[in-house]
Image (tube, rainbow, N blue to C red):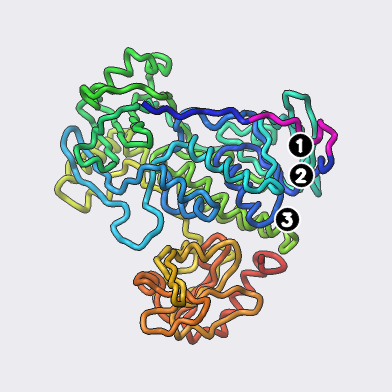
Amino acid sequence: MTRYAYRRFPFVTPPELAGGAGAGRYPVAIVGAGPIGLALAIDLALHGVRSVVLDDNDVVSVGSRAICWAKRSLEIFDRLGVGERMVEKGVTWRVGRLFNGDKELYRFDLLPEAGHKMPAFINLQQYYVEEYLVDRCHDFPDLIDLRWKNAVIDHEARADAVRVEVATPDGRYSLMADWLVAADGSHSTTRSRMGLPFEGETFHEQFLIVDVEMEEDPFGADGVPERWFWFHPPFHPGQSALLHRQPDNIYRIDLQLGPDADADVEKDPERVLPRIRAIVGDRPFEIDWLSVYRFRCARLDRFVHGRVIFAGDSAHLVSPFGARGGNGGIQDVDNLGWKLAAVVKGEVNSTLLETYDEERSIAADENILNSTRATRFMTPKSATEMTFRDAVLALAGSAPFARRLVNSGRLSLPANLAGCRLQGAEGEGAGLAPGSVCLDAPVAEAGADGAQGWLLDHLGGRFMLLTIGEGARAMALPRLARLHVALEGEAAAPGDLVDRGFVAARYGRDVAYLVRPDQHVVARFGADEAPALSGILGGAVAAAGKGVPA
């Protein structure tokens, strides 16, 4: 059987201790080399901004940990240069099946329509994600300084910079950063040093996670990966259970234990092994990793504190149900990266970072709400909640309306930014509303070659005007890049993209969109609303600072 081969990254004496040139001050210092910190360093590098990443460890995360990566996160990872590698390695699943006892209530398809580059979800262990991100960081040797065994032990925020104190095997040193990003996880030492309240709810239910290595597929002869969730499973009475597949023939099993379980006892092989056999039967297996956990739903009141910015679990925590933790953190990066880069390069003033706090606070609240609802459905805390849950499950097998009430974790979706200060008005005609994330669609490049590709590969990284259909071709804005998609029956010009059957259906016809660097829609206009374009752009610029980030 194949096991993940952990490799230790070398410690290199930092220039501050070696006395080399170029030591001392950095545009951005990032605390934590997990998925969030590494992804942010890459995003900044794509904008030409240097960062130093400081991590107290020298290895990727031990154990699978976060494994479910949603379509939007995969699109972000693709923009960062690791998405295709993740999908190639990951296990793609679309079908989920939900059971009550030994009875299947229903099944669902996460991506029922075609025409998307990325699947609805993949399962891929966090250690692979971190490995791929580390490899990608090495593509930017002049922009990303990745330092292992460099533990941040103190920091001092000043008016124009942050002084960071670091401990290494070779001794301590200080560096200065214009901005400090805390991506140091759920037990953030940065957050603790600053004494910031981290308010929320602690759930006392405990869960056992077991990664099982198994050659024989428990999902059946066709070998199609699925996600199976049980309420009241016959092999684990009165609780809940989850089974799904990861790469390398690893299967994740989640078992609810209850609030009074003793974590040390529950991890004893004599208790774990019979539970696994009850699920997988006589199939040979080996335990790869296991953990017992309880969780919190909590968040900081603000994510931006002067020159210190929080992202990922250091800013907000949710339960694992719905896969909103890691996915939410990657969407933090998508929102923060272009804004912080624009501020560092002097393209806008620092008030733009307030929109990171505004927009990602909305997303965090949405994720916490969905996570809390799922937890209460799965682990009812009162007789009323239990009666409601049991009634819903009794109806769900035959009544489709009841299935919408079953909550084993509302799976991660991108936050809608409608109403936030960077968003504009919704113009005439059908299409995506302001605040929505752009949808992918298959396109071809104009010309004899007609190379085929995907719309999202051409959006992102800068503000852009997207025009669709002949009626919108003439719409343009000074200083703003424009991308035109020609529809069926329209003569495509050099530089155009050509719709392959999905753009018009998803975006509308003869319409223009102002698109942000993170692929969110600022505003939508019909062909006869061209004069309003400059006004909307001006509003976005005013909210952003002093100019349009390139």
Q: Earlier in the sequence, mark 2 or mark 1?
A: 1
Q: What type of secondary structure mainly makes up the magenta span?
A: loop
Q: Is residue 304 left or right of residue 325?
A: right
Dot 2 corresponds to which residue? 177
Q: Position of residue 216 (x, y in %)?
A: 25, 30
Mark 1: which amino acid? Val
- Give the labeled residue for mark 3: 344
The crowding category of the residue bearing disc 1, from other C-alpha atoms within 10 Å (few below 14, some 14 to 19, many at least 20), is some
Q: Is residue 256 magenta?
A: no
Residues tagged 2 and 1 counted as in contact (Cβ below 8 A)? yes
**Residue farthest along the front direction in this orientation:** 448
The residue at 32%/55% (across/down) is 111
Residue under the point 61% across and 40% down = 183
Query: Label 3 is placed on what type of residue?
Result: Val
The residue under label 1 is: 164
Residue 239 place in picture, x, y as percent: 28, 28
Q: Residue at coordinates 27% horizontally, 51% vertically from top-left?
A: 109
Q: For numbered disc 2, what is the local secondary structure?
A: strand
Q: Nearer the viewer, residue 123 or 293?
A: 123
